[in-house]
Image: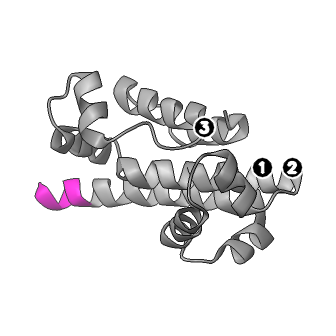
Amino acid sequence: MLKSLYTVIQSARPRMKLFPRAIVEAILLTEGPIGPAHDVAGTLGLGSRFRLARLLKREGLPPLHRIAGWVTVNAWVSAAEREGSSLFRLAYRSHRHPSTCYRLVKEVTGLNWAEVLRRGSAWAQRELIREIKASTCASVTQAEHLR
């Protein structure tokens, strides 16, 4: 588990409700995806992936796949810094095709792997927290607009 990331998220969002907190903790424990949204929704008794999406949005969190993507990238960057491993080796170890991993890094961060690795795990953590806070601000702004 990415303990430091968990601590940072917990301090950034201390009042997070039970289900959203459980989802974030599960993603952190697995260091990535916890399954398709409809399966996660079913496990939590929400009925549909759309209810899950609304729950996360109301809590001010990004969609499930964005949280999982950022946590995965954070785990890879931390492992690469700690072990000196390449993304190719990390992909192989996690039973993923390397090109899929490189695409995920680009999709989530907007940068290539070399640039993400150069910026480091601290940068990746800050970006995840920034996205979580941006989602919070967007949901508050939207709620105020609907009043």
**Secondary structure category for the residue under label 2:** helix
Residue 5 vertical placement versus 138 (above, below) = above
* Residue that badge 2 annotates: 82
Residue 128, horizontal then vertical, whole percent: 56, 56
In this orientation, does residue 61 appear?
no
In the picture, measured across the screen, residue 74 lies left or right of residue 62, that is right
Residue at the far left in the pictured view: 147
In this orientation, does residue 31 appear?
yes
Residue 16, horizontal then vertical, whole percent: 43, 32
CA separation in Å, label 1 and label 3: 24 Å
Please tell me whether residue 123 belongs to the stretch shown in magenta: no
Q: What's the amino acid at mark 1?
A: Ala
CA separation in Å, label 2 and label 3: 25 Å
Q: What's the amino acid at mark 3?
A: Ser
Callout 1 crowding tier (Cα within 10 Å): few <14, some 14–19, many ≥20: some
In the image, what residue occupies the spot 76% across and 67% down? Answer: 117
CA separation in Å, label 2 and label 1: 5 Å
In the image, what residue occupies the spot 52% across and 30% down? Answer: 25
Residue 75, horizontal then vertical, whole percent: 67, 48
Mostly what secondary structure, the magenta segment?
helix
Residue 110 vertical placement versus 12 (above, below) = below
* Residue that badge 1 annotates: 79
Q: Which residues are magenta?
A: 142-147
In the picture, measured across the screen, residue 126 lies left or right of residue 107, that is right
Determine which quarter of the picture holds residue 138: bottom left
Q: How many marks?
A: 3
CB under 8 Å between discs 2 and 1? yes
Residue 4 vertical placement versus 143 (above, below) = above
In the image, what residue occupies the spot 68% across and 38% down? Answer: 2
CB under 8 Å between discs 1 and 3? no
* Residue that badge 3 annotates: 11
Colour mapping used in the image: one colour
